[in-house]
Image (cartoon, rainbow, N blue to C red):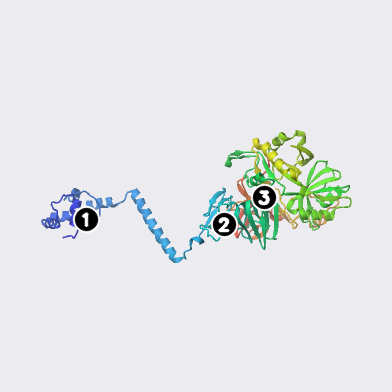
Amino acid sequence: MIEIDDTLLIEFLGGKLDATTSAEVERWYDASDENRRRLERLYLVFFTGERLSAAAAVDPNLSWQTLRRRIEARRRPAPTKRLRTVVRYAAVFAVGLLTAGSLLFPYRSADDRTCTVTTEERACSIRLSDGSNVRLMPHSQLRYASDFGSEGRTVHLTGEAFFDIRKMADAPFTVDAGKETRTVVRGTKFNMKAYDDCSDIETTLIEGVVDFHAGDRTVTLSPGQKISYNPANRKLMLREVNVDAELDAQLRSFQYVRLSKVAESIGTHYGCDIAFGREALGEILFTGPTALDTINHLLTNDYNGMAVNKVRYGAMCNADGGTIDDLVVYKFGEERYLAVVNAANREKDYAHMAANVLPGTQCQDISDTVAQLALQGPKAPAILKKLLPEDQIPKGYYTALPKVNLAGMECMISRTGYTGELGYEIYTANENAPKLWKVLREAGEEFGLIPCGLGARDTLRLEAAMPLYGHEMDETVTPLEAGLDFAVKLNKPEFIGKDALVAAGTPQRVRVGLAVTGRGIVREHQDLFLNGEKIGQTTSGTHCPFLGKALAMGLIDAKYAAVGTALEADVRGRRVAVEIVPLPFYKRG
């Protein structure tokens, strides 16, 4: 007799057997060989757990082979059931693997766990566990603890982010940007830019208090102040960035499109860009009967023959031919010239100029009395026409009008631009800046006028391949190496640095354009290699949003500068493929 639970068997048979107890089943089993075979088949069906009909199971005409096939068919799971089975076994396997991993690797507490968020083409918003908000800009990374402790909070930033931590508890909040620089804040809003491969680390405070740590120095920021720190030369610069509260807030909005195109990605069409430029430029006035001779002595271009109200670009060299700065010169009279320089170089520029003026020239730094707003883009003329008659708007490129009454303010307006787009620069007294800002915003509202900061300006100038001091040129790079030969007149009788430039002959290194063909973004100060040999270094680079690709400029050995040459850039120890391409990357059509 097969030992089975006959009660279950009888239940399974559904009353088909004439038995209610195990004794009766046993007697029925022993009654004949046929009954034994029938019960064994029933047992087989029952044991496998399959719900075949009792009648079919006990059918004497049903062969064992047919019975097994039916049982196997019933045991074979349907597709949905099979999928559930696979998922169930996969889950069991994963749990087992994690359990084994916990034995092999030390367990870390919640306070030690870190989360990493990396953005590609789009920004994203992050809510930290303490209620703080972070807006991480494209091509950036934020690493932070999943659970902040009450003793303090630390996040690690590579790239650019906007922090709003007004909701945090009263505990230190530290942004570690590497390279000896940290920003420690309490209950504040601020924007921070800190790339691993970027020389400058910047923080702009909007609201609250920030202690900016730079090496062994600590600077406390006030709202509307911007600080940058270069760990390589330990240079620290503090600047004002706001005219009023509205301007300060608006400057935080960076626009990632060309000014003359439709920005489909953000659903807006605009033709203008307004940038507050007080912190970007310095103004130095030259007057006197020998002012022209002094200008020609100091700068590489030839300023003879300039018409009044014309503007001319040039470079200023040291005795070795290195570039002290690049600048533009306005002529407002035979004895009156205005040089507009980079604000970061203002003090050293003025010191060099004052030390080398010719007798009969007065040199005066008037930067602290002047503010400048730049109105850029194809709709800029239409905006100005709402505020000025046409004869008060400069018509030609690199021209200026020194005395224009704009909404009751005396202004100087020029048409030069540093974005690759049509645009104007409006200079006025510092005290007029808030009013000028509001007047321009109101006049441009119907044209979709938007504000932007120097971050957007830098992207635009890179797309237009315009060199920037501190990147494509410095005192170790000549203007000829930087590709500024159009502004270097070696046929001039003399200028500071001419002898060194002539003696050097044809430049042995040149500025080139680079398109990134590999994965990644190439930024400044990254070595360039050809067949394993270092041949130069990048000077500027980023993802160019309008062109939709990563681009860079670099200084390389002139003999390898042919368009189409494939190179490699060393990006934090990883080689990224780049290719030399023509400059500029973008040209206004």
Asked whether residue 5 appears in the rendered view, the answer is yes
- Residue pointed to by mark 2: 170
Q: Residues within 10 Å of mark 1 (few under 14, many from 20)?
A: some
Between 565 and 102, the one lying in front of the other is 102
Q: CA distance from mark 1 to mark 2?
A: 73 Å
Q: Residue at x 82, y 44 (%)?
A: 331
Q: Nearer the viewer, mark 1 or mark 2?
A: 2
Q: Are marks 1 and 2 in contact (CB under 8 Å)?
A: no
What is the x, y in percent for residue 359?
A: 89, 52
Q: Earlier in the sequence, mark 1 or mark 3?
A: 1
Residue at the disc numbered 1: 44
- The quadrant in which residue 429 appears is top right
Question: Residue at coordinates 60% horizontally, 60% vertically from top-left?
Answer: 573
Give the foreground label among 2 and 3: 2
In this view, the residue farthest toward the left is 31
Between circles 1 and 3, the one closer to the viewer is 3
Real-space Cα distance between discs 1 and 3?
Answer: 85 Å
- Nearest to N terminus: mark 1 or mark 2: 1
Q: Earlier in the sequence, mark 2 or mark 3?
A: 2
* Residue 191 screen position, x and y as percent: 62, 51
389 or 563, which lies in front?
389
Number of disc labels: 3
- How many residues crowd mark 2 within 10 Å: few (<14), some (14–19), many (20+)? few
Task: Using the numbered discs, state the Cα–Cα distance from disc 2 to disc 3 in whole angstroms.
Answer: 23 Å
Quarter containing the C terminus: top right
* Residue bearing mark 3: 224
Q: How far across and down, in percent of the image, does residue 20 sit?
A: 14, 53
Marks 1 and 3 in Cβ contact (< 8 Å)? no
387 and 171: which one is in front?
171
